[in-house]
Amino acid sequence: MIRVVLFCVIAVCLYAQADVQKAIELHQSGDYAGAIDGYRSFLREHPEAAAVRSNLGAALAHEGHYEEAIREYTMALDASQGATQVRLNLALAYFKAGDTQNAINHLERVHKEAPEQAQATLLLAASYLRFGENKKVIALLDPITSLATADLASAYLIGTALIRDHQVERGQSWIDRILKNGENAEARLIMGTAKFMANDLPAARADLELAVALNPSLAEAHAYLGLTLLRAGDTAAAMKEFKRELELDPNDFDANLQMGVLLRQDDKPDEARPYLEQALRVRPGDYGARYQLAAIDLSANRLDSARTRLETIVKEVPEFVEAHVSLATLYYREKRKEDGDRERETVRRLTAAAQAKQTEGRAVQP
């Protein structure tokens, strides 16, 4: 869906030296390691060559060296005085590195400078979707897409966002649009997502299993199948799906978070921590991942770290019952009875309010 655009013509015009031309040829032929060596050799003599530095960033990103690619793109952006295409490539490197927030920061600027840039628009929508910002995906794509003209990538992004935003009827119209092209893994993923959210687990599982059968490499399909299996109580099968998702996309938020949760529950905190930290890199500030890390710190008696995390969480999300429970435990462990009693009372109050709300929801309407 998204691909790096090389600055080959610009580079050749500005720098006719044989070594950079050779590096470009190697890059275009798929010899990325050779291209990287060639670009670096040229840049030692011409460090100001923004286009060549951007090409180096592209080759490094293709090889999975995202931190190095980001560094090269950043220098190229400075040297090119903020060229839009260089910024787009930098954003793509951030996206692939799992740094969604920085990807969004640069993509929003690209979209503002060049709203007609379709690649940037789709990548921005994909970034919002990864970040769980469904309404922003809809607001971005709604004005420029229609059922009659949208390509499958746009249809998939807006359809997914609508379903996850609980706009099921509108989302269904996009599913139908995708299915006009025949049985489709993307449509089955959206349908499975909708049924999962409606807690229709058998139907969700059927759609999601079909999605991964049609396209085993489809992003998020294994993660949602794992979530469905987990909710149905099949933990072992769920973990297999989360692992499969992470083989395809190490930056999938749900797969990282759930692997961390399951490993922590299985008393494997050292194995759980890297997954939770990666989940936080994808969605900085996510309080679920932060709580899990706090729970690991608490179980290891790292009280200062656990207290900092938990006190911040309950301040930001005061209705988070589990965080209050853990914070009460921590305070009692520190012999801070008054603080522990206060948190325990907060837990009692929140629990009572939740139970009252459930009872009200079950009441028969006259």
Image (cartoon, rainbow, N blue to C red):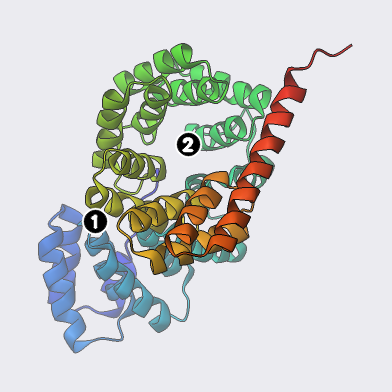
Q: Residues within 10 Å of mark 1 (few under 14, many from 20)?
A: some
Question: 18 or 224: nearer the eye?
Answer: 224
Helix, strand or loop at mark 1: helix
When asked about the image quadrant of residue 282, the answer is bottom left
* Numbered badge on residue 62: 1
Residue 201's spot in the image, x, y percent? 47, 16
Residue under label 2, please give it: 153
Question: 256 or 349: nearer the eye?
Answer: 349
* 21 sits left or right of 126 in the view: left
Q: Residues within 10 Å of mark 2 (few under 14, many from 20)?
A: some
Establish if 249 lies above or below 22.
Answer: above
Residue 179's spot in the image, x, y percent? 50, 18
Helix, strand or loop at mark 2: helix
* 19 sits left or right of 244 in the view: left
Mark yes or no: residue 199 visible. Answer: yes
> What residue is shown at x 59% (from left), y 29% (from top)?
163
Establish if 56 lies above or below 135.
Answer: below
Residue type at the position of mark 2 = Ala
Question: 83 or 11: nearer the eye?
Answer: 83
